[in-house]
Amino acid sequence: DSGVTQTPKHLITATGQRVTLRCSPRSGDLSVYWYQQSLDQGLQFLIQYYNGEERAKGNILERFSAQQFPDLHSELNLSSLELGDSALYFCASSAIHRGQEGRTEAFFGQGTRLTVV
Amino acid sequence: LAKTTQPISMDSYEGQEVNITCSHNNIATNDYITWYQQFPSQGPRFIIQGYKTKVKNEVASLFIPADRKSSTLSLPRVSLSDTAVYYCLVGDSQTGANNLFFGTGTRLTVIP
């Protein structure tokens, strides 16, 4: 158990709909990352938050948005869903080593499998 | 952000030692090297992290030469359960954002 909790585990929805994926980071971790992994593809970095603020952005579509709340949990919102959005969505959290910003180890949740039909 | 290059795939027989090498020519002074393991439909799992020379834990060893432009993950006596994708990442000290960009990884297949 990595300590990172993602809900729901599975989600099936229709095209055009909107869904929200939730992530609870490990206790004390301030940084949260979101990734998308399509079938047999690599991990595509979407976005990172640190202590409530957006820290870095990857190839995240405009239809997607995220936020991190004061209690540090994060939500990824996916709207106007298309068939191609079907994928595993992973959340990870990490602690930041002060003065060692080049030293990051992340802990991943088990993912949310989104199926758009 | 230092880019990494590693072989797309490798095959090995059970019981053999497997070495996966990763190139990171542009690694910055303060960047650490981290390896993750991912099984199908699961989130990546941290394996080992190092800065220089050799690091060893109960799962693997990590060898980093003096110039730090490459690193080698060594898995002793692999078993079928080691079949997975292995990712090499380097830190992101230059931006300070602690980004985690995963490359394509190395797909290791262990053969009986």
Image: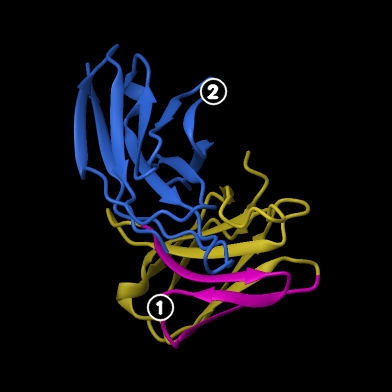
Stretch in magenta? A43-70
Q: Which chain shows up in yellow? A: A
Residue A102 in the image: x percent, y percent?
A: 56, 54
Q: Nearer the viewer, residue B47 or A99?
A: A99
Q: Quadrant of the N terminus of chain B?
A: bottom left
Q: Which chain shows up in blue? A: B
Count every numbered label the image shows and give the total.
2
Q: Is residue B105 above or below residue A63?
A: above
Which numbered disc, 2 or 1, marks the residue closer to the eye? 2
Q: Are marks 2 and 1 in contact (CB under 8 Å)?
A: no
Q: With B58 as the anchor, is A43 left or right in this view? A: left
Question: Magenta includes A67?
Answer: yes
Q: Quadrant of the C terminus of chain B?
A: top left
- Outermost residue on the front side: it is B66
Give the label on residue B57, or none.
Answer: 2
Residue, x 41% and y 82% (percent of image)? Answer: A61
Residue type highlighted by circle 2: Asn
Residue, x 72% and y 55% (percent of image)? Answer: A98
Q: Nearer the viewer, residue B50 or A60?
A: B50
Q: Which residue is mark 1?
A: A14
Question: Magenta includes A91?
Answer: no
Instruction: Please tell me whether mark 1 sits on a helix, a strand or a loop.
Output: loop
Residue type highlighted by circle 1: Ala
Q: With A86 as the anchor, is B8 left or right in this view? A: left
Q: Magenta-highlighted stretch: main secondary structure?
A: strand
